[in-house]
Amino acid sequence: MTPREIILKAFEMGRPERVPVTVFGGGMWSIKDYGTSFEELSLNSDKMADMCVTESGRIRSDVVYVGSGYNNFHAVAVGRALGAGIKFREIGAPDLTGHFINSEDDIAKLDTSDIHKDPVVKTVMDATRKVNEKIGKEFLITMTCWGPFTLAARMVGEETFMKAIFKKPSFVEKMADFCADLLIRLYDPLVSEGTLDCLSIADPTASGDLINKKQMERFAVPPLKKVTDWARSKDAHTILHICGDTSDRLELFPMTGASTIFFDQKVDIKKAKEVLSGRMCFGGNIAPVHVLLNKTADEVEQACIEVIEIAGKDGGFVLVPGCDIPPTIPYENLKRFHDVAFEWRL
């Protein structure tokens, strides 16, 4: 089986020949390892595609994430006229320079039809096409984005958005729904033309460390479901990752419609298996800093074995870090993380 076939079988809650394995995102690590920068790649789709293809051979994950680290550009693409901008950093993903949505009236000023006109968004989309053409038969190719709730919070400002949950809940719902529509428009050309059959969504502002279970069910799940329903209607899968401890709301994840949920290291993976086994593919959850960055390769191997023993022997499971990986993780640790899965026959 190819890496693509292995992870797709897990998404369908099947039992592939070995443990599926992937990083989540990996843009910061890949760009540093390749010897370039986010800014240098931002307008060069050929080089971005070459970076993704080259690093896929180094990292060896079953999934290749094009555009990892460029998620803030989706906000800029629709908000530039309202003052949205990007600041590149020496290390790390580019940041928004400020927030630009203050009211429901501002939402009406945003035009999602402009999203593909943004030069960086166009670069990422063109790179996705080139990566898929080169290695899409072997690996599962995806393009990354923020989830609707997180993208809305980026536009409004996270602190203001959290307060609005209590003071202006209708505004929060409308903003998240707008962002769901924005993401559908973003992905539509690639999905409709057959380039992509998997979306990758990170929704960290829907974290269990920021909103409670009832708030997640009301404000974050419906816009996610809107995107995943659209994806399923196009025969496309969705990878979802939400940061923080979500152990108290595991039963909400099948409601999102995602093909798989990749858990943060704070989540009790045993409990996740008890709740989700047979209902939804899930992945977890090696700590990217505490283990992958700071431990030895032998300790990384042991941590992976422990997670697989608990949750990964019955299918419908993916070995994955608890979040995106830091750019300074030693290659030997990343190699060992994958080797454990490659050598584990189910």
Image (spheres, rainbow, N blue to C red):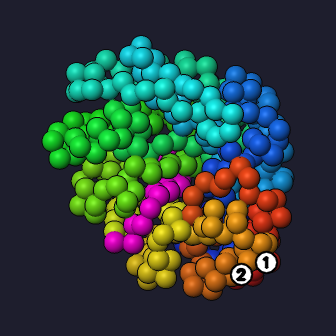
Report helix, strand or loop for mark 2.
helix
Q: Residue furthest left?
A: 167
Residue 152, horizontal then vertical, whole percent: 36, 37
Q: Residue furthest bottom?
A: 309
Query: What residue lies at 75% left-to-right and 41% top-to-bottom?
Result: 31
Residue closest to the eye, 224 or 35:
35
Residue closest to the eye, 193 or 95:
95
Three-letter residue code for mark 2: Gln
Query: What residue lies at 70% left-to-right and 22% top-to-bottom?
Result: 43
In the rendered image, the quadrant that contains the N terminus is bottom right
Report helix, strand or loop for mark 1.
helix
Query: What residue lies at 42% left-to-right and 13% top-to-bottom?
Result: 81
**Is residue 11 among what the camera can see?**
no
Mark 1 crowdedness (10 Å alpha carbons): few <14, some 14-19, many ≥20: few
- Residue labelled with disc 1: 298
Residue 71, horizontal then vertical, whole percent: 54, 37
Residue closest to the eye, 36 or 185:
36
- Residue labelled with disc 2: 302
Q: Does the magenta segment cover residue 282? A: no
Does residue 43 appear to the left or right of 250 in the view shown?
right
State which region is magenta. 231-248
Q: Does the magenta segment cover residue 232? A: yes
User: Compared with residue 91, is residue 308 higher up or lower down, i.e. above or below?
Assistant: below
**Is residue 211 among what the camera can see?**
yes
Does residue 299 appear to the left or right of 225 in the view shown?
right
Q: Quadrant of residue 196?
A: top right
State if disc 2 and disc 1 touch (CB < 8 Å): yes
Q: Quadrant of residue 227?
A: top left
Q: Residue furthest top?
A: 81
In the rendered image, the quadrant that contains the C terminus is bottom right
Query: What residue lies at 48% left-to-right and 43% top-to-bottom?
Result: 146
